[in-house]
Each structure stands twice: as structure tokens, then as C-alpha cells.
Image (cartoon, rainbow, N blue to C red):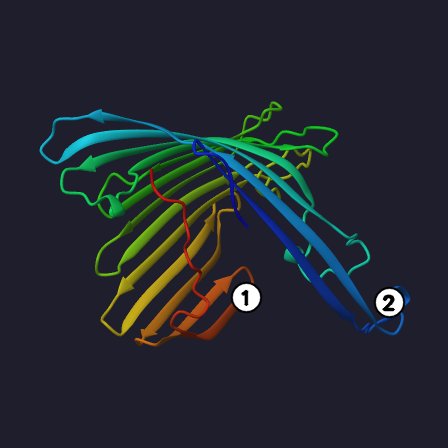
Amino acid sequence: NGPIAFTPYLESSYLVGLRETLYFIEPHDSASEEIWNDGSFEHRTFYNVLLTGATTLSRDYAISTKKYKTFRHAIRPELSYILVQGTDQDELPILDNEDRILEKNWLQYGLNNYFRAIRLDEIALFRSNFSSFKINQVYDIDAEDHPLSDLYFEFIVRGFQNLFFRYETTLSVYGEGVTTYSLETRYKNTRGDSINLDYRYKLHPEIDPPYFYTDAQGESLHEIRGNLTSRLSQLFSIKFDTTYSMSSDSTVDSTFSLIYHNPCWSLEFAATRNVGDTSFYLLFSLAGIGTPIDVSLPEF
């Protein structure tokens, strides 16, 4: 991957990838033996291409306050081409839903708005947007019917100290109205305590982003999710997660955890309860292993 140099006014990049999956299949029942005989090796090859182009237009407005000197509004239109193609997967074993790779020939376009108030004493390196508003949609080039995905809207507010708000919604362009929406609130203090409260609605629970049209019929999803983390001391913290379904008027799952923190590792004891099942587990984690690296675009 890397940048593509066309003009200083256009930010463009490419990404090319290749994925190879090897399967050793050993059947253990008569139905499997009819398909794969006594055992066999199978493989799956997929490649992906991502081309992205974007530009940024911004304007500063002078404001006369004791704390802030400038209000900045940046508009960033983006256009991406996404291609994921590969070998036939119908004859391969289904390990789980994540194992199947979705083929794509998509065109994605969006318009992002960023808002920022710049302080008099602010260092440019640490500037961050206090609000953003994004719109995007996907066009499926290979689709014969309903090629357009739902319109996606996201509004984020970070204008309050230690508080974060995000509202997301999708709007069908084929007459279904609002198909999803969610409201996320998060509070976190310098001690390490945090509380999250989310509400989520989906017209079709089985459909994932970017939410293409479906004629599937079923009950919609209404959920409230809560998360509470509290630092008891330098060594111990507790965490509680729960999901409550308003559709079925029941608790879907809940987890309580006690975590021991060490500079180099942590140990978590958790009790989880969901519909018809209660489980306990111990999780040992080394510092820095399994933690994703956050790489993001620079702020505007």
C-alpha cells in the first residue's frame, strides 16, 4: 500500500492484498465422507484492491473569546473503490460465519464535516475535533436489483470534558424509512473510571453494514447496553457489562469481572450469564500483546 501522487490538492492511495487459506479436512461421519472422502486438502485464494481519493476544504472563522481564537470547519469528500474477489467457497467447510469472505465490487462515497475550536494556548500537534458529521453510501456494481446501500449518517460530539456522544442512523433509499439508529454515551475520568450507555435499533437484525436492501421478514431489534468500569486501587478494578433486549423484555447477557493489574501483565476473573447458560473464566494478558495499534488520519 502507499500514496498515489497526482496533485497536491488530491489525497489518493492504494492498497493491494492477497489471502490464502489452507484447509485439512478429516471427516468423522458418513455425510462428510460422501463429500470429502477419507480426507483432503483444500485451499482458498482471495485478493483485494482498495483505491481511495479525497480532498479537504477548510475555513477558519475568527472568534473573540477569552479561551478560543478560531473556529474551523473542514469538509472532506471521499471516493473509494473496493474489490474483493476469490475462488468459490461453496465446497469448503463452514467453520463459522466469520470464515466466509464476502466478495465485493463496490464504489463508496462520502462527505465528512469536521468542527474545531482552536484555543490560544493550544499546540497544533494535540488539536482534536470537538464535533464531526459524516454521510456515506455504497454502490454495488455487480448487483442487479437494489444496488444502493442505505444512507449512513454519523454525528459525534466531544465538546464536553470527559464526555463523548455519538449518534448513528441509516436511511433506506427504497422506501423502508429508518433501518437502524444508535445513541452512544461515554464518560471517563482521569482515575480510570468509565461508564458507557448505548441504545441500538435495527429493523433487520441479521443485516450488517453497509445495510443493503433486504426483503427478509422478522422481528426488529431494540437493545440497551451498559458498561461500568471502576478502579478500586492501583492493583484492582471491577467491570460490569450487560445487554438488555427491549424486544423480548429480558436480559440477553451480563458479565462481572474482577481484574488484577500488574505493570507487565493482568489477570481477570469473570462470571458471565446469558440465556440458559452461566460460565466462569480466567483471562491472563501480557502488556502490549493482543492490543491493537491505533493508526488514524491526522486531524484537520
Residue at the image point whose x is 35% and y is 63% from the top: 239
Quadrant housing the C terminus:
top left
Q: Which mark is residue 36?
A: 2
Q: Position of residue 120 (x, y in %)?
A: 14, 38
Residue 202 sits in quarter: top right
| Residues under numbered marks 1 and 2 in contact, where contact means CB atoms less than 8 Å apart | no
Under mark 2, the amino acid is Trp
Q: Nearer the viewer, residue 141 or 60?
A: 60
Q: Kindly identify which numbered label has been placed on residue 277.
A: 1
Q: Position of residue 250 (x, y in %)?
A: 49, 51
121 relative to 267 in the view: left or right: left
Q: For mark 1, give the secondary structure.
A: strand
The residue under the point 69% across, 45% down is 103
Q: Nearer the viewer, residue 194 or 36?
A: 36
Q: Nearer the viewer, residue 120 or 228?
A: 120
Q: Residues within 10 Å of mark 1 (few under 14, many from 20)?
A: few
Mark 2 burial class by Cα count in 10 Å: few <14, some 14-19, many 20+:
some
